[in-house]
Image (spheres, helix red, strand yellow):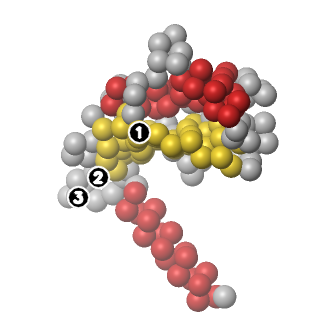
Amino acid sequence: MKPLYAWLVVFAAIVTQGCSATGPQSQPLTHRAIDPPGLFAMPGFHQVMATTGRETIYVAGQVAYDENMKLVGIGDYRAQTIQALGNVILAIRAAGAEPEDIVSSTLYIRGLNAEAAQEIMAGMAVALEGQPFPAHAFSMIGVETLADSRILIEVSAIASN
């Protein structure tokens, strides 16, 4: 087991160095970590990772937590969808994109069934300040549970600006 552990430590060091926002000044920055105001911050985790070039923005799974990590809409798929998508919008705007720049998202849904899907779609219809969330490719995936047993939906997204 020791050789595997040693390999994991070396791998983690390489990945950490490669993704670091600080490094040798002779190399261009290729990844940018963003922890926007309005979303909770946690060591070892970033809400948004952006790459240079025609920028592609990868948003970590967003749930219905507010900036103080208080869960919004306990037991309510629609309310949690609106909050989670609002968090996605905060994240992509922090990276310089707009909701229309979202190209893909994945919705992980606890207890996915027809009624839950209907409530989620109702939330998506008003998630952008009363307007529908912009059309994009997305998948709904049913899961048994999420990180907090009260969370009903988690949304990860990819945008390009």
The residue where tag 1 is placed is: 137
Q: Nearer the viewer, residue 2 or 146?
A: 146
Q: Amino acid at mark 3?
A: Gln
Circle nearer the viewer, 2 or 1: 1
At numbered mark 2, what does the secondary structure look like: helix, strand or loop? loop
| Residue at the (74%, 42%) spot, across then down | 111
| Residue at the (74%, 25%) spot, across then down | 76
Q: Amino acid at mark 2?
A: Thr
Q: Amino acid at mark 1?
A: Ala
Q: Is residue 107 above or below residue 4?
A: above
The residue where tag 3 is placed is: 27
Q: Nearer the viewer, residue 16 or 48?
A: 48
| Residue at the (27%, 42%) spot, across then down | 55
The residue where tag 2 is placed is: 30
Q: Is residue 156 left or right of residue 135?
A: right
Q: Is residue 35 left or right of residue 22?
A: right
From where the camera sits, is residue 42 visible? no
Q: Nearer the viewer, residue 109 or 93?
A: 109
Q: Are marks 2 and 1 in contact (CB under 8 Å)?
A: no
Q: Position of residue 27 (x, y in %)?
A: 23, 58
Q: Position of residue 126 (x, y in %)?
A: 53, 15
At numbered mark 1, what does the secondary structure look like: helix, strand or loop? strand
